[in-house]
Image: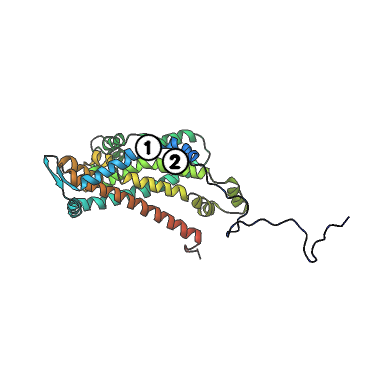
Amino acid sequence: MTAPASAAPGAAAGPPGPRRTGRTGRTGPRRTGPNRAHVWATRAPLLPALVFLVAVTQLPFVATLVISLLDWNALAPDDRHFAWFANYVTVARDPALRESVLTTALLTATVVVVSVVLGLLFALLLDRAFFGRGLVRTLLITPFLLVPVSAALLWKHALYNPEYGLLNGALTWVTGLFGATGPTRTDWISTMPLIAVEASLVWQWTPFMMLILLAGLQSRPAETMEAARLDGANSWQTFRYLTLPHLRRYLELGVLLGSVHVVQNFDAVFTLTSGGLGTANLPYTVYQTFYQAHEYGSASAAGVIVVIGTAVIATFALRVVSSLFHETSTGKEAKPS
């Protein structure tokens, strides 16, 4: 018998290497993509919700855009024609609208900032264990559960009324304790109309901010907080370097939702001041144009501007909050000497 041929000298014995296919050097069979029918089958239950969302939000906005390009007065329904961007020019030149834009920006910024600060303070309070915490939490949440018109009526009659309002009664009682005399029938809405509207909105939106921030406080990792205490960090250092950075996403969410809703507020302005005394914001100006002047085209153009203004304010608020936290995380803030 002849012996099998030996391997060539210098050849290394070992398992055969992978077989190359084509120019790309891929090995084995090519992977196939997911089954399209299976993908669409998993997405099918979401299609009704998507159709409903488009029908409820996008189609009315498209209709508003179309109407904003028309010269349409309800008192002359037959005289209706395309005016293209003339309504936007009219709205932009309207001094009342420009004043309402500034009022809206001031109202939104004040209410959101004060609500976030007060909501953070109440959230820090409720994050601690004390007797009756459940009752206190329920009482603090109650203002947000009220209907906006009911909350505005409560402030208008129960607090601001110059004859029997709680504020005048408390002021009279306090001045009587010190034996002093002062104005006992102050008309708060006429004296400080914008502050009156802002106070009622802050009272209603503070519980919302408190709930969001309280959820953030209760989601902090307990191990990290305990390690900070063991390392000797005091309460301010723990809040400054651990709690506040952790609350970033919750603060951004509160500022975003608060800005979007407060900039569209109509109930408090309509109920408390009826848009007078320099408190007319953009939604109230749209209401006046639509229901009092019967100018559908101009009102629709103002409504589009309200939507754009809401997006701009919300984006600006998010960028401000994000930039503040970015500076904090990168250490750009001034260090104490």
**Cα separation between marks 2 and 1:** 10 Å
Residue at the spot 46% in from the left edge and 33% down from the top edge: 135
Given residues 246 and 230, the one toward you in this image is: 246
Residue 197: x and y in percent read: 28, 44
Q: Amino acid at mark 1?
A: Phe
Task: Assess disc 2: are there few (<14), some (14-19) or many (≥20) residues with their C-alpha within 10 Å of its C-alpha.
Answer: many
Label 2 close to label 1 by CB (< 8 Å): yes
Q: Which residue is mark 2?
A: 211
Total number of numbered labels? 2
Q: Residue at x 61, y 47 (%)?
A: 223
Q: Camera-side residue: 17 or 52?
A: 17
- Please, is residue 290 above or below residue 314 in the view? above
Taking the spot 18% from the left edge, 45% from the top edge, the residue there is 297
Q: Earlier in the sequence, mark 2 or mark 1?
A: 1
Mark 2 residue element: helix
Q: Name the disc covering residue 273, or none.
A: none
Mark 1 — residue? Answer: 144
Looking at the picture, how far across and down is residue 253, in whole percent?
A: 42, 47
